[in-house]
Amino acid sequence: MERMLDHPLDFARPGVDRAYYEFTRKPLSDSCWSLHTGPDGRVYAAACCEHTGGETATVVRYNAATDDLDYLFDLDEVTGDRRDSGRATQCKIHYSFAPDPATGILYAATHLSGPPKGETRYNPWASWHDPVRAFRGAYLVAFDTGKDQVLWSELMIPQEGCRCLCLEPRRQLLYALTYPRDHLVVYDLATRKLQHYGRFGSVNSQCIFTDRQGRAYTFIDTGRLIRFDPDRETIEELPHVFPHEPCQSARHGVIYDAVADPATGAVYAVPWKSRPHLLRYFPDEGENGRLEDLGLVGPPTDPRLPITVNRNHAGGLVLHGDWLYYTVSHWPPENLERVQIGNPTRDQCITLVQRLHTGTLVREDVCTLSAGVGMHHYISRGALAQTGDLFFAKIMARPAGIYRVRVPEIGPQDQPNIRYWG
């Protein structure tokens, strides 16, 4: 564990405590795409190795008793698709944890990008028909959080990776988007069968969410909201697009992260798009639901100049009571030109944790995050442990790691903070 580094942009509200836990036992890890509260109320993370050939992802868990990380299992060992097989590796879990509180199982699906052993890059299109090097496919792993053991694993999506995963607990269905073909698939946990429902586009959405009826939603690469009804087995294109700045079109308005409010049924979401807006969507209101644009999050940019989606980023959504916590890339105005069109240093760009009161829509800065190696401006996912600790996952680092943030307003939780999607 380490505290925040001495960073020129460092900030924290009074009473906020921050710590960083590097994946020291996974020195080649380069990202943490999945971070989730399990059905046991503990926080799980994936130490991913997507840029080093012949490596695999490891599932870790924060241990509150030792204030450290427990390394639970390696994906290649539990799937049987070993890292040194000569194929593209089981290198990561990409927004694909899904907890089931009724059974105590945390599901995890794997994704591709890690090259075979001895290679530096992997192209799934170019290797699609390669009998030796091609990715075997996304495996689904069922981890019993009560017994601390993997119950089973099996090949869920042949040849493709799982970009994001969502559990519909009542029907025991898993919704997923595949990569590279960007297909919506539904996996039946009772029959262990997979059904394809068609291609959505060329830019994968990073999240699927559900409503109280168990219908699945995502935004596709045109920016349009899509709904899948599992009973009718139909896909509908709804008359909503992801909100965006006047200088932008709706293109690339896919969803990045989302969290639901159990009290109102509202879903809060941010896109995988530069100059991100926060939206609030009420899926159960009217035939098509009601969408609200809650405005730009993150620092302003020059609309005359481009900026990359990974540099101008929002993510890490966590809801606690009336407060929505999230992270944004942050820089002061004097660093804008270097950040927007140059190559910013670690000191010029950082992660800022903010929160929004869902009633008044007042926003407050909570703290910055800047520990560990690598860049500091991109958080993939957030989670709330039953202890009351917030966690945020870091990428663009080797080794990667996770942050713990304690705020005075959040105490121990009576029940786990369950989000059914990754």
Image (spheres, rainbow, N blue to C red):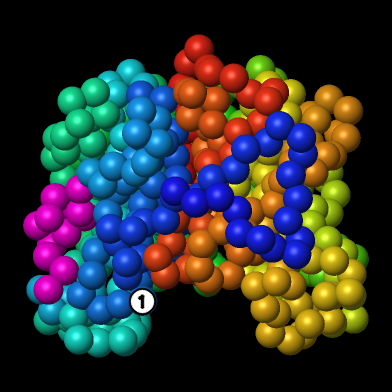
Q: Nearer the viewer, residue 381 or 237?
A: 381
Q: Amino acid at mark 1?
A: His
Q: Position of residue 357 (x, y in %)?
A: 80, 30
Question: Which secondary structure, mark 1?
Answer: loop
Left or right of 344? Residue 144 is: left
Q: Position of residue 175 (x, y in %)?
A: 40, 43
Disc 1: which residue: 51
Q: Is residue 250 above or below residue 379?
A: below
- Which residue is at a point 27% across and 54% down the rendered structure image? 58
Q: Nearer the viewer, residue 150 or 155?
A: 150
- The magenta stretch is 73-84
Q: Position of residue 73 (x, y in %)?
A: 20, 48
Left or right of 328? Residue 412 is: left
Observer able to see residue 140: yes
Observer able to see residue 271: no
Q: Position of residue 403 (x, y in %)?
A: 52, 47
- Which residue is at a point 49% across and 24% down the rendered structure image? 387
Q: Is residue 182 above or below residue 167?
A: below
- Which residue is at a point 12% across and 65% down the rendered structure image? 82
- Which residue is at a point 80% across and 53% down the rendered structure image? 297
Residue 76's image quarter? bottom left
